[in-house]
Amino acid sequence: MLNIVKNSPLVVLFSIFSCLFQLSIAASSQASTSTSTPEVEVVGNKFYFSNNGSQFLIRGIAYQQNTANDSTSSFQDPLADQASCQRDVKYFQALNTNVLRVYAVNSSLNHDACMKIFADAGIYIIADLSEPDISINRDSPEWNLDLYQRYTSVVDMFSNYTNVLGFFAGNEVTNNVSNTDASAFVKAAVRDMKKYISDQNYRKIPVGYSSNDDEETRVAIADYFSCGDLSEKADFFGINMYEWCGNSSFQASGYEERTEEYKNLTIPIFFSEYGCNADLPRRFTEIGTIFSSEMTDVWSGGIVYMYFQEANNYGLVSVDGTSVSTMADYQYYSSEINNISPTYAQSASASAEATQTLVCPVEAPTWMASENLPPTPDEDYCNCVAQSLKCVVADDVDSSKYGDLYGTVCAYVDCSDISANGTSGYYGKYSYCSDKDKLSYVLNAYYEKENENSSACNFSGSASINSSASSSSCSSNYTPTGNSNSNSNNGTSSDSNSSSSSSSTNSSSSTKKSSGSYTVKTISKTELLAITTIVTAFMCGISIVIFE
Ligand SMILES: *[C@@H]1O[C@H](CO)[C@@H](O)[C@H](O)[C@H]1NC(C)=O
Ligand SMILES: *[C@@H]1O[C@H](CO)[C@@H](O)[C@H](O)[C@H]1NC(C)=O
Ligand SMILES: *[C@@H]1O[C@H](CO)[C@@H](O)[C@H](O)[C@H]1NC(C)=O
Ligand SMILES: *[C@@H]1O[C@H](CO)[C@@H](O)[C@H](O)[C@H]1NC(C)=O
Ligand SMILES: *[C@@H]1O[C@H](CO)[C@@H](O)[C@H](O)[C@H]1NC(C)=O
Ligand SMILES: *[C@@H]1O[C@H](CO)[C@@H](O)[C@H](O)[C@H]1NC(C)=O
Ligand SMILES: *[C@@H]1O[C@H](CO)[C@@H](O)[C@H](O)[C@H]1NC(C)=O
Ligand SMILES: *[C@@H]1O[C@H](CO)[C@@H](O)[C@H](O)[C@H]1NC(C)=O
Ligand SMILES: *[C@@H]1O[C@H](CO)[C@@H](O)[C@H](O)[C@H]1NC(C)=O
Ligand SMILES: *[C@@H]1O[C@H](CO)[C@@H](O)[C@H](O)[C@H]1NC(C)=O
Ligand SMILES: *[C@@H]1O[C@H](CO)[C@@H](O)[C@H](O)[C@H]1NC(C)=O
Ligand SMILES: *[C@@H]1O[C@H](CO)[C@@H](O)[C@H](O)[C@H]1NC(C)=O
């Protein structure tokens, strides 16, 4: 639901000032270890307070301002500005809030002040690990070094606060049957963050996923994230749920069917967003049901979308600088959320289920994500290989040209080492390295295939020879399994050296365009289409340079 866009200069100025303001007092604040927010842990399909074993139900609010029209920053970190946290906390308290969901944080800013304000108010944070510019792209999914480093930086930043409820490794990445393969990459992120948290001896902060509510995939995706090996499965599952609109009911809304579908899930499930706005003002009549015994055995509460009133009309309050005015939705939400009296389970009666796990969903036309997950990105391996490449992408080639170059060179060499396929479960051993290193890797492969003929390391000036490349052998702790299913051209060098065969190489390579999917992750489908067109045209030109 949340679509973070750019912000106005005024807001930037405001946030710069409040940032300075915060810095001046940050020195006195420390990592919070508040007694009002004892650690919350997962046992079986529920969250529990660690201090008394009482069930924890999420009474949450989504808390992230849309940063429209900001050219200097792609998002505004809601936990880095003490003044706004101070401004808003009294509203959260009035709304009986115990969780805030934030979608993008800046791991180079200080969060001590806000984390303490919220801890003192008994409020936990659940944070997405991605940010708009560094997230798993459903159209060309990867679990790569950049993402790994971004995710671990957020984990490092937040690991020490007791009022962190959990992390989302992705939000609505797979959103329909056409991109279920992307979930393999998100699940690898879950696995690696769980391992990272454990390796660093951090508190066992749960890592989960936030899904959309797609009719065809919603059951399979929950099973997929909660199934299999304990080290790989998600610790919890959120679903962004907008089925209950206006004056509905447990039966009529679809909540009853969803509850039946998810009742066997072995991890906690909750609404990571809710609050349909088809009828305004929103009366939030679903809240009584969410916190009733009809749902609390299966569901762990929910996070209402959202605090700030914006163009999409989901706000509880309207904020202008330091002033906050409450909306009609706020009053309705307040009276519902302050009027619940749930029955809480006890962790003591749950320990038997604690290590249960589901069987993974069988592959079906509507569920194509492999159980075989991508490897953990290994920086040392990427660097070691990069330093050994004799032919590399020239420094002055803009990264926007990488897509074209992948398409070109992958028509002549086997690119399976840099490719990753979440459907087949085949991940090349160099597939998680940077786009630049991956491009150099395949340029080098072509150069070697041409017996290091210097004219094979040019590509119209896009490639250059590195005469100081080291000859060290690099060992990867990962060996791909399964079928690479590579559609790359497998012509031999004798073919390509003969000018008579160059035209047949051309025609065959253009029918093998699926290899053009080795593109940089930021490329959209439309751009990809454009690139594929360009590459097809471009390749005819380059083949003359190379082969004649
Ligand atoms: C358990 O502890 C939490 C946090 O201190 C508290 O909010 C809750 O009321 C307690 N529950 C019971 C049943 O004592
Ligand atoms: C962004 O700026 C443009 C031009 O100033 C304006 O028309 C548009 O409404 C703004 N978008 C948002 C979301 O504020
Ligand atoms: C994060 O904060 C740093 C320090 O203020 C800033 O330089 C950087 O641009 C911010 N990153 C984003 C993505 O906003
Ligand atoms: C986390 O908190 C502990 C205990 O307060 C402290 O010893 C440690 O230095 C903190 N670590 C970080 C990274 O802030
Ligand atoms: C699936 O989602 C993608 C990306 O949001 C969209 O472009 C595509 O049309 C959708 N396909 C189906 C079958 O709904
Ligand atoms: C919902 O019920 C309330 C109270 O009964 C009523 O005032 C309101 O008009 C109803 N809304 C809709 C959309 O039916
Ligand atoms: C839940 O488990 C029960 C008992 O194993 C089974 O009968 C039922 O079909 C399962 N429900 C779903 C939705 O998988
Ligand atoms: C060339 O190889 C050396 C030695 O491995 C390495 O340090 C350097 O970064 C490489 N240069 C380029 C442009 O890849
Ligand atoms: C990924 O693998 C599947 C199944 O093996 C295959 O059908 C599909 O074409 C592959 N995708 C790409 C982009 O190669
Ligand atoms: C290198 O490639 C060029 C152009 O294809 C060719 O003319 C030349 O004979 C090759 N050199 C060797 C040593 O194979
Ligand atoms: C590389 O290609 C460019 C353009 O095709 C050409 O001008 C240049 O001489 C070539 N460089 C080498 C070292 O072959
Ligand atoms: C490529 O072709 C060679 C020679 O025809 C063959 O030995 C090799 O197995 C092929 N490799 C792939 C990946 O198809």
Image: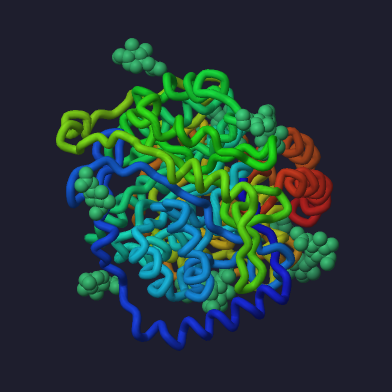
**Identity of the residue drawn at 73% across and 70% down:** 8
Q: Quadrant of residue 284?
A: top right
Observer-nearest of 387 and 35: 35
Q: Residue 411 or 270: which is nearer the viewer?
A: 270
Residue 82 shown left or right of residue 244 in the figure: left
Q: How many marks?
A: 0
Q: Position of residue 531 (x, y in %)?
A: 77, 49
Query: What coloring was used for the rendering?
Result: rainbow
260 sits to left or right of 413: left
Residue 421 % position (x, y): 53, 38
Quadrant, the N terminus: top right
Q: Does residue 361 sit above or below 322 in this rendering?
A: above
- Would you say 275 lies left or right of 209 here? right
Task: Report whether residue 244 is seen.
Answer: yes
Could you tell me which residue is drawn at 58 percent across and 50 percent down?
A: 330
Viewer-nearest residue: 136 or 119:
119
Res 441 visible: no
Q: Quadrant of ligand 3?
A: bottom right
**Quarter of the rendering containing residue 229:** top left
At a point 20% along the width and 38% down the height, the residue shown is 347
Where is residue 509 shown, x and y percent of the image?
72, 38
Say above or below: 352 vs 125. Answer: above
Report x, y in % for residue 390.
53, 65
